[in-house]
Image (spheres, grey):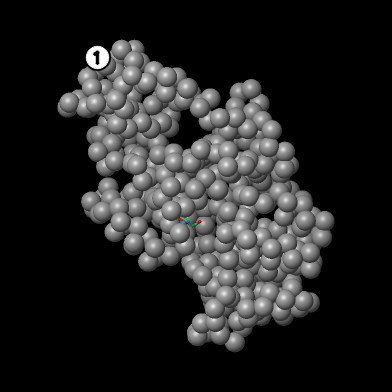
Amino acid sequence: MIQIAIMGLGTVGTGVAKVVAENAKQIERKLGEPLQVKTILVRNFKDGPYRQLMTDDFKKIEEDGDIRVVVETIGGVEAAYEYTKRALEAGKHVVTANKQLVAEKGAELLALARKKNVNYLFEASVGGGIPILHPLTQCMAANRIDEVYGILNGTTNYILTRMVRTGAFFSDALREAQAKGYAEADPTADVEGIDAGRKTCILADLAFGHQVDPAEVPMEGITKLSLRDVKIAQRAGYRVKLLGRAVRLPGGGRTAYVAPHLIPEEHPLANVEDVFNAVVVKGNATGEVMFYGKGAGELPTASACVADVMECLQASPKRDEIGWSPDTTGFEDPQELHTRYYFRIEGSLTDAAMAFGQVEVLSEDGETAFLTDRISGQDAHQQSKFLNVLACMRVLA
Ligand code: HSE
């Protein structure tokens, strides 16, 4: 019998307990022994099927030699960081879905895991149930990764889909996403692009091998997005999606950011809807490879956690290929990137043409919506300085 502990019994922690119980036979067949949740760390005791396993004392996990893997689903940094360090110090593997902790402290925790000859695995931290970190670091290991981009937040994709398809209000769609267990405890992290930003940092860390500090990554969510722009874009053959992008720059540097984008309707990301996420990885040998699936929710995310638990138990000694350097030099402002830009201005086509030269007009009715040629972020800013800009987004092309 292999015993594990779960820290935190929210959406993902509960999912992990359920997957371990419901898929016990498949898991046992693959591990050669039954897997059992022995202890669950909680802040407040709750009645229910796991009541007997609950403790509010981390030492019960830390000092229990029978517990080989700890699943951290507390979220946030403080307690999660402390308990993760202590569990690794105690020689236990740690598995997590906590993107904030991995984005901020991943390099340090991986170094500690390496020192203690255990694993720190976090497949569930990006893309929920989609296998993306293992393929990126293992299956695509022979490539130079030039770019990773995609729809990385299920809550905002769900909200946008509901608003566009059924005309739902933002607040109602957000409430639904919360009820379905997609949103973070504080949904500000979802709607302001911070959750997608943390996931973008993890993808960038692994793709480029250097720490990307979340504080340096511009993150814009969907709260300032107007349905008017979504409709103009749709009529012109585009969809609007919140994208995270991590890009290797021609000079050797790298950059990352999160923002709403116009996506041509024939692009595979354009039809990724509801809670689904999709991540595109551009390798210099493979070209573009896309990963698609449910990006949030109890069981998809738990599936990735439990697979990591099983990997810890099967992979001995620890795997080496997951990791990156804590050196953050070489990170550049995403304004360096050249893309087409969508603008909606209070003004005429003449105003737009005076600022940008030739533009592609999408709509003209007092306000003018148009697309520029490919320009840098600095030029987009500089050339629109004298316009009354009502909306501005990059175009994925
Ligand atoms: N709140 C996150 C989302 C959960 O909506 O994508 C999965 O990381």
Quadrant containing the C terminus is top left
Estimate the x, y position of residue 50 in percent, counting from the top left. 56, 82
Q: Secondary structure at mark 1?
A: helix
Q: Residue at x 37, y 21 (%)?
A: 385
Q: Identify residue for label 1.
A: 350
Nearer to us in this view, 265 or 199: 199
Residue 379: give x, y in percent of width and height. 45, 19
Residue 90 visible in image? yes
Specify the quadrant of the image occupied by residue 319. bottom right
Residue at image x 55%, y 39%?
Answer: 217
Question: Between residues 149 and 315, which one lies in front from this camera angle?
Answer: 149
- The kind of residue tagged 1 is Thr
Would you identify the image quadrant in which residue 2 lies?
bottom right
Estimate the x, y position of residue 359 in percent, counting from the top left: 32, 18
Q: Quadrant of residue 210?
A: top right
Query: Taking 118 as reference, is 377 left or right?
Result: left
Is 122 or 21 nearer to us in this picture? 122
Residue 234, given in percent of the width and then of the height, sits at 27, 37
Query: What residue lies at 54% left-to-right and 73% top-to-bottom?
Result: 9
Neighbour tally class for label 1: few under 14, some 14-19, many 20 plus, Cα within 10 Å? few
For ligand 1, tell me if the residue under mark 1 lies within 8 Å: no
Q: Quadrant of the N terminus?
A: bottom right
Whether 50 is drawn above or below 290: the answer is below
Q: How many marks?
A: 1
> From the viewer's perspective, is 13 left or right of 166?
right
